[in-house]
Image (cartoon, rainbow, N blue to C red):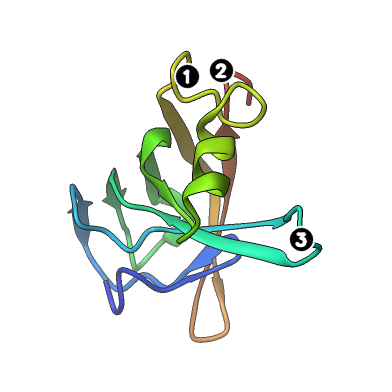
Amino acid sequence: MNDPGRVHESTETLGVEDEHLGPEPSPFADRVRRRAHDGHDGHGQFRKFTAAVDFDEADPERSTVEAHIDASTIDTGMEARDAHLKSADCFDAGSYPELVFRSTHIERSGDGYRIQGDLTIRGET
């Protein structure tokens, strides 16, 4: 990876043949914007995940990415917000301990790559 902690919305820059990422500590960023109770957008990161990347630079569309994210490791820097995100109101980490991302399409985009895929949260994709 050029910078394994650098995530841009649903796009990550790849520069590897085959890569397996994880576990802790990881800077896997939670890029989902959430309106916090105080009216500000919140950002956070998941501290524990594993990801498998099978990258074919000659034919990026044959590449795959699969990430398994430990929902209980969300860290926004605010304990009350983290507890809420882990609760049944949001991720329900007690019942659904894992979020899963599986790529469905990878293509060149500028000097990097765009990755599209399915994200499973609370058992729903």
Q: Secondary structure at mark 2?
A: loop
Q: Position of residue 68 (x, y in %)?
A: 36, 36
Residue at image mark 2: 123
Q: Position of residue 3 (x, y in %)?
A: 31, 77
Q: Position of residue 112 (x, y in %)?
A: 48, 78
Q: Is residue 102 above or below residue 15?
A: above
In the image, taking residue 82 as reference, residue 18 lies left or right, namely left
In the image, taking residue 86 as reference, residue 116 lies left or right, namely right
Number of numbered markers: 3
Among numbered discs 2 and 3, the one appearing first in the sequence:
3
Rounded to the nearest angstrom, the CA distance separating label 2 from label 1 is 7 Å
Rounded to the nearest angstrom, the CA distance separating label 2 from label 3 is 29 Å
Q: Position of residue 93 (x, y in %)?
A: 46, 25
The residue mark sitting in front, 1 or 3, is: 3
Q: In the depicted view, which residue is nearer to us: 97 or 118? A: 97
Q: What amino acid is found at the position of numbered circle 1 in the picture?
A: Tyr
Residue at image mark 1: 96
Q: What amino acid is found at the position of numbered circle 3 in the picture?
A: Asp
Q: Is residue 78 above or below residue 81?
A: below
Mark 3, Cα crowd under 10 Å, few <14 / some 14-19 / many 20+, is few
Q: What amino acid is found at the position of numbered circle 2 in the picture?
A: Gly
Q: Secondary structure at mark 3?
A: loop
* Residue contact between numbered discs 2 and 1, judged by CB atoms under 8 Å: yes
- The residue depicted at 47 percent of the width and 19 percent of the height is 96
Residue at image mark 3: 38
Mark 2, Cα crowd under 10 Å, few <14 / some 14-19 / many 20+, is few
Among numbered discs 2 and 1, the one appearing first in the sequence:
1
Among numbered discs 1 and 3, the one appearing first in the sequence:
3
In the image, taking residue 24 as reference, residue 79 lies left or right, namely right
Viewport quadrant of the N terminus: bottom left
